[in-house]
């Protein structure tokens, strides 16, 4: 690139849409990314996944910026003057697009860097292939701005930019509801995988090819004198799109065994988190141990806690029979992964730790999530999840009461409401008060009986246990 | 590279016809121009801008032949050569308001495919020639109407064009600037072909070596400013000799 071209690019960068694009993408990106920091703080791969999720807002911004830049020649009525110059029109077009792309890239880079600043100091797992995901995000912005530029050139209206932004937002939204492979045609991903899964680099390369070929086709259509030349990049785009669209949807996610490897705190009882979440282990372990102490002397009581992220589908089902397959369904086509627990481990007596939402923006354990969840409630949930029957219409009222009382006991609640959106009825509170008024040995005996009945799905016994507390 | 390399005819238009649907804007114009400053006069709607646009390679002729610098404009391959040697200031001058004067002129130097190493000096020189040196780093949107026009002239002359087409360049210039502008035209006209469309007959009288009057799409008078003055000796309509000549030329054409 000659110095003259560099200077021209610099002019476009400062005088065109690029600064606005950079600023709006950085502001919108940081606002949306940090609004859901609990899903990625401290973790590289989830940061990348969430960067792809917020593209639902950033891609429309890039498209609108491109369209605004593309309409500039017409808005400024400068076409006449440009038409009398020697340089082929594709060159100023390319410089113009490059400036917008660089603007959007700066915005995205700032967003990612802000997130990375919170991840780098604490991350306990380097992640797998996640940076390909970041590259796809950049390619997505490049494609959006190119398509925007072309549309802005072709349609003579100032409203093109905002309308195109809305169209991209709607298309992106629809794409995230697709279960099949077509969702991958948009750079946006529909949900975060908590860093326990990854996308194959080969697949992401195909996505990058698709996006960049689309960008090239859009630019050639408006930039080249021979428009038919755009069929070449268009053909490449179609060839890349076919395996994407016809391939699996959520099944593209591959389980990452390293991310799911158990990292256990020193000492007993056992408290283990997935490697990807291990940065909060020091926060989590003492609290969980304190809660596990309550179960000492309860027959069949819980004696260890393991991160939900690590467990295979089968392990989860055994540990939380009550949650059943309906509550823990694997999305279509997604592969299960290997068990992480030793064959001898009694999963029935294992608390499943679901740390979702419980990690705060600074990568420490949150006292209470925005939905009111606390670590205490998460651990106590195990008491209710011991219930081994299909949860549905046939569950007698008394069984609900017993489950609720057991959970309150496990959480060490006094008479306040849990505050996590579950509501404790008057009757349940009274039953719980009754249990607490008993001597400790009797409390533990009742809990032991409850666990046995719940695991056996013995409704008669549960009804009787609830009756004892009336 | 600044020296004119041209020996033959700069502008050679033969039987040029331009139609917009049913309306005929140019109706068989013949025009041969060499170095010097050529004035283009004519009433509103006469076809001056249309002729300029054809010469600037942005409008297509319906029939007839147009060649610039010995290149036939109908040949795509020759266009690029011609455009490198062209300067053009449209009547409706569009610009990017956020660019500074220097950036705008430099941007066009790039578009005209000038030798990159020659650009910085040429840009400074062009800006100086239109008297905007002290405003070179101001954004275009901060300039007055006349200054903007001068920035437009600067981009037109940055490549030392062999053919310079200026469509009403003096509109909005203050008297002092107009005097300097005429001086600039004379300098450029020494080795280039300058075609100036204008309604300011006085400008033509002072700055031009040749005059063409168009009316209803036809060239109705061609000659020197003195010839035009002579043509008006019999009429009394007009405040100056050259205005009288202009009026006479238009009237004579309408009678035909
Ligand atoms: N793009 C166009 N479409 C249709 N008609 C046009 C177009 N451009 C010019 N014309 C017509 O061609 C004729 C010549 O117009 P032109 O602009 O060349 O006149 P002019 O001599 O430059 O006038 P003025 O002194 O007002 O600038 C006019 O009748 C005009 O209406
Ligand atoms: Mg005109």
Image (spheres, coloured by chain):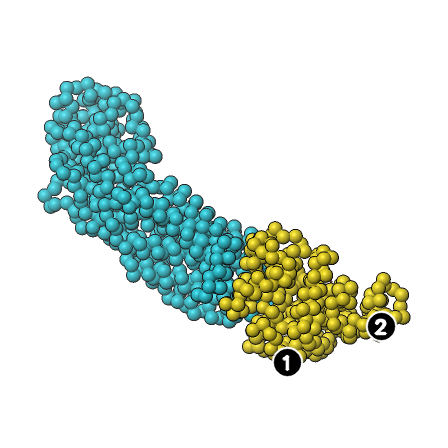
Chain colours: A cyan, B yellow
Pointer 1 local density, CA inside 10 Å: few below 14, some 14–19, many at least 20:
few
Q: Quadrant of residue A377?
A: top left
Lateral position of residue B197 relative to residue A322, left or right: right
Picture coordinates of residue A226, whole percent (x, y):
51, 71
Q: Quadrant of residue A274?
A: top left
Tag 2, which secondary structure? helix
Q: Which residue is mark 2?
A: B230
Q: Are marks 1 and 2 on the same chain?
A: yes
Picture coordinates of residue B65, whole percent (x, y):
66, 78
Lateral position of residue A91 relative to residue A315, left or right: right
Q: Residue at x 29, y 23 (%)?
A: A416
- Vertical arrangement, residue B66 with respect to residue B118, above or below: below
Q: Chain of mark 2?
A: B
In which quadrant will I find the N terminus of chain B?
bottom right
Instruction: Indicate if the residue with disc 2 has its beta carbon within 8 Å of ligand 1.
Output: no
- Vertical arrangement, residue A38 with respect to residue A158, above or below: above
Task: Tell me if I can see residue A125 in this picture.
Answer: yes
Instruction: Indicate if the residue with disc 1 has its beta carbon within 8 Å of ligand 1.
Output: no
Q: Which residue is mark 1?
A: B7
Picture coordinates of residue A272, whole percent (x, y):
18, 40
- On residue A228, the disc is none
Q: Residue at x 82, y 67 (%)?
A: B242
Q: Residue lying at the far left in this picture: please name it.
A: A344
Task: Tell me if I can see residue B212 in this picture.
Answer: no
- Vertical arrangement, residue A452 with respect to residue B95, above or below: above
Q: Residue at x 29, y 35 (%)?
A: A366
Closer to the camera in the image, A171 or A26? A26
Picture coordinates of residue A94, whole percent (x, y):
48, 63
């Amino acid at each position: 690139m000659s110095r003259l071209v560099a200077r021209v690019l610099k002019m476009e960068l400062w005088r065109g849409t690029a600064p606005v694009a950079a600023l709006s993408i950085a502001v919108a990106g940081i606002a949306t990314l940090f609004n859901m920091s609990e899903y990625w703080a401290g973790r590289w791969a989830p940061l990348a996944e969430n960067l792809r999720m917020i593209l639902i807002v950033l891609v429309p911004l890039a498209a609108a910026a491109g369209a605004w830049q593309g309409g500039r020649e017409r808005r400024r009525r400068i076409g006449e003057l440009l038409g009398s110059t020697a340089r082929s029109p594709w060159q100023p077009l390319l410089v113009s697009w490059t400036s917008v792309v660089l603007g959007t890239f700066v915005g995205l880079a700032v967003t990612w860097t802000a997130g990375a600043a919170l991840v780098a100091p604490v991350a306990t797992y380097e992640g797998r292939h996640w940076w390909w995901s970041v590259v796809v995000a950049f390619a997505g912005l490049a494609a959006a701005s190119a398509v925007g530029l072309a549309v802005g050139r072709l349609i003579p209206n100032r409203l093109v930019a905002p309308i195109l932004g809305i169209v991209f937002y709607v298309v992106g939204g629809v794409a995230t509801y697709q279960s099949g492979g077509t969702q991958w045609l948009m750079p946006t991903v529909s949900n975060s995988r908590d860093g326990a899964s990854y996308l194959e680099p080969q697949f992401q390369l195909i996505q990058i090819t698709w996006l960049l070929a689309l960008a090239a086709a859009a630019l050639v259509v408006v930039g080249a004198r021979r428009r038919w030349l755009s069929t070449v990049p268009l053909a490449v785009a179609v060839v890349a799109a076919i395996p994407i669209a016809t391939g699996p949807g959520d099944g593209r996610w591959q389980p990452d065994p390293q991310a799911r490897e158990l990292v256990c705190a020193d000492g007993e009882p056992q408290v283990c988190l997935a490697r990807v979440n291990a940065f909060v282990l020091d926060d989590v372990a003492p609290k969980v141990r304190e809660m596990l102490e309550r179960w000492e002397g309860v027959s069949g009581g819980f004696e260890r806690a393991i991160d939900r992220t690590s467990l295979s589908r089968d392990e989860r089902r055994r540990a939380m029979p009550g949650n059943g397959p309906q509550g823990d369904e694997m999305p279509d086509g997604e592969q299960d992964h290997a068990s992480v627990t030793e064959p001898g481990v009694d999963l029935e007596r294992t608390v499943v730790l679901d740390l979702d939402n419980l990690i705060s923006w600074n990568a420490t354990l949150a006292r209470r999530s925005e939905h009111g969840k606390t670590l205490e409630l998460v651990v106590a949930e195990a008491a209710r999840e011991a219930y081994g029957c299909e949860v549905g219409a046939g569950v007698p009222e008394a069984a609900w009461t017993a489950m609720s009382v057991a959970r309150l006991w496990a959480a060490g609640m006094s008479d306040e409401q849990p505050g996590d959106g579950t509501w404790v009825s008057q009757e349940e509170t009274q039953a719980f008060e009754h249990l607490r008024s008993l001597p400790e040995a009797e409390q533990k005996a009742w809990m032991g009986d409850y666990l046995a009945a719940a695991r056996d799905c013995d409704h008669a016994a549960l009804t009787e246990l609830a009756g004892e507390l009336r | 590279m600044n020296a004119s390399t041209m020996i033959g005819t700069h502008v050679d238009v033969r039987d040029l016809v331009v139609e917009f649907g049913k309306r005929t804007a140019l109706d068989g114009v013949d025009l041969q121009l060499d170095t010097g400053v050529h004035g283009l006069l004519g009433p509103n709607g006469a076809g001056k801008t249309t002729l300029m646009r054809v010469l600037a390679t942005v409008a297509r002729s319906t029939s007839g032949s147009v060649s610039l610098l010995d290149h036939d404009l109908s040949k795509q391959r020759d266009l690029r050569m011609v455009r490198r040697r062209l300067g053009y200031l449209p009547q409706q001058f569009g610009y990017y308001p956020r660019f500074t004067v220097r950036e705008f002129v430099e941007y066009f130097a790039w578009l005209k495919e000038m030798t990159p190493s020659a650009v910085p000096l040429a840009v400074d020189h062009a800006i100086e020639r239109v008297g905007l040196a002290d405003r070179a780093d101001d954004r275009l949107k901060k300039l007055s109407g006349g200054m903007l026009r001068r920035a437009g002239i600067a981009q037109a002359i940055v490549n030392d064009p062999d053919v310079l087409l200026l469509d009403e360049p003096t509109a909005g210039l203050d008297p002092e600037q107009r005097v300097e502008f005429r001086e600039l035209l004379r300098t450029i006209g020494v080795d280039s072909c300058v075609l100036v469309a204008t309604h300011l007959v006085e400008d033509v009288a002072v700055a031009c070596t040749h005059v063409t009057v168009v009316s209803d799409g036809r060239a109705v008078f061609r000659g020197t400013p003195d010839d035009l003055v002579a043509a008006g000796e019999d009429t009394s309509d007009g405040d100056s000799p050259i205005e009288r000549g202009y009026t006479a030329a238009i009237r004579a054409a309408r009678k035909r």
